[in-house]
Amino acid sequence: MPENKNVFADLIPYAARKFVPADASLTDKETLLGMYQVLLDRPVKSSDELERWLLDLSELDAAVSQAAGILYVSMTCQTDDPVRAGQYQDFIEKVEPALKPLHDALNRKYLKLRETIAMDAGRYLVHDRAVRAAVEMFVEKNIPLQTELALLSQEYQALCGAMTVEFDGKEHTLPEMSRYMEDPDRDLRERAWRATAQRRLKDKDRIEQLFQKMFDLRHQVAVNAGFANFRDYQFKSYLRFDYTPEDCRKFHSAVRDVVVPLRAVIDAQRRDSMHLDKLKPWDVSVDPLGRPALQPFKQVDELVDGVGRIMRSLDSELGAIFDSMRASGLLDLSSRKGKAPGGYQNTFDEARQPFIFMNAVGMDDDVHTLLHEAGHAFHASLSAAEPLVFYRHAPMEFCEVASMSMELMASDRLEVFYNAKDAGRSATEFFEGAISVLGWVATIDAFQHWMYENPKHSAAERRSAWLKFAKEFSGGVVDWSGLEEEEACLWHRQLHIFEVPFYYIEYGIAQLGALQIWQRFRRDPQIALGAYKQALTLGGARPLPELFTAAGIRFDFSREIMASLMDDVCREWKRLRAAQ
């Protein structure tokens, strides 16, 4: 649970309710069915009445979304609490399936009304095409399959949240074990890495079985909806109107040609700096010059203090948003046993308030993670004035621009945590990551394309495909000999594959957008920040390329732009590295 246990009770609607009763039970199935039915039955005869109908639907959707979000956040904050798990499970098993047919009926009513009622075509362009896609994809017999998939996702969360390691006489969560990867003692790193890997391998069969169930269900959902495979289904489900699977393949190719050679150079220099014959997986996070791990903070409050200072130095409005989140208890940042892995930002849609979840353990990476999630939070806050909930959520490709740009713009302000030399060291490692992440994105995305394009593949074929893509996009310097099983199961740790399939290419597309913002920011910080904030206020009310344009950047992930951006990143990395 968040440190402030009254945080959810303190949430109040951003705007006074006009349709949803103040005392409505927003997790009670019959109550919700009744409210949606009122909207379904309401006669609508004019554009004013249709706009009022949309606003009422938005108000109800936001209230229900917030109720569901509270259940999800509570569950992930403590996955081993049976009460929280049960409440969340009850909602996704009983409430969500009952609402889906009504949502479809409301979508169909809206499209029917739009045939005779004129509306502002520009204002409703994005909404109209999203509703049409939802109607085309809705298949009632998929509802129980989607419910089962949500429950399997919860099972994956619980399985990972329960993983701990006994190491050097103490029980550690897996995020806590990652601290050992930055220790200069190579023997200690190896022991810690192997202990963590063995803990993951202990559940490898359960994870494989869990994924296979997910995979089979997803394929059936796609077939039921008339698609040849789940890849094509998911592209439409994610409303990817502005790029295609073929564009993703071009991205993979550009990464292979431009990024992979750079990654090989970085890894080779690391190996040589460390005077190693072979660079092993436990050597990739430690300082190559043998310096102790960076320690930006000891207590989570220090992390929050430092990031708050960075935000206020960048922009007073962003600083105020972050400070307000802290004061409202909308941060749960510490790692603990039973907490779900990873980090995320969740928006409570009725209050229009962001919430940040992560697993901080005192590492340099924690600083960048909080900066990243704060970028998402700013997106939610700056688009909060948009009256329609449908437009307060942007496409993920642009949501990640919001978060990744924040990391980049803050990269020269890390002295709030470090002295000048260590701040430069942190930035050096960050820019190495900015290069490496593109290779990992290509690996995860190409692997998913292969799996879902080949729905009859065996577990052995899946393993071979993973190893092929891992080799293709890694640079080939890290030596996995003797660790074949660990490498083959590496994808088990990527929660997106299990929980939000095909949601990963967004990080690659967004990184290219964020790097363009960084380029502008170095030339003129105020202009770059102004465009960034203006674009975030749009939420998802405009098509994806227009959101990029509003931020002053191009929606382009071609080889040419990737090469240009990597040139700048490499120059910055070399400058920072030379200063070390």
Image (cartoon, rainbow, N blue to C red):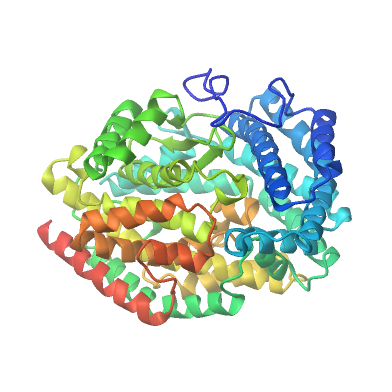
> Vertically, is 5 above or below 309?
above
Residue 258 appears in the figure: yes
Q: Which quadrant of the figure contains the N terminus?
A: top right
Left or right, 518 with respect to 547, comes to: left
Q: How many marks?
A: 0
Q: Position of residue 555 (x, y in %)?
A: 44, 71
Q: Position of residue 9 (x, y in %)?
A: 57, 19
Q: Position of residue 404 (x, y in %)?
A: 38, 55
Which residue occupies the foreground of this view, 195 or 87? 87
Q: Quadrant of residue 136?
A: bottom right
Q: Quadrant of residue 259?
A: bottom left
Left or right? Give the position of 525 relative to 126. left
Residue 293 in the image, given as x and y percentages of width and height: 25, 43
The structure residue drawn at horizontal position 64% and vertical position 53%, both measured from the top left corner, is 498
- Residue 481 shows in the view: no
| Residue drawn 77% across the image and 59% down it | 111
Asked where in the image residue 78 lies, by quadrant, the reply is top right
Farthest right residue in view: 141
Q: Is residue 559 left or right of residue 156?
A: left
| Relative depth, front residue between 567 and 210 | 567
Viewer-nearest residue: 354 or 92: 354
The quadrant the C terminus occupies is: bottom left
Q: Left or right: where does residue 432 sit relative to residue 534? A: left
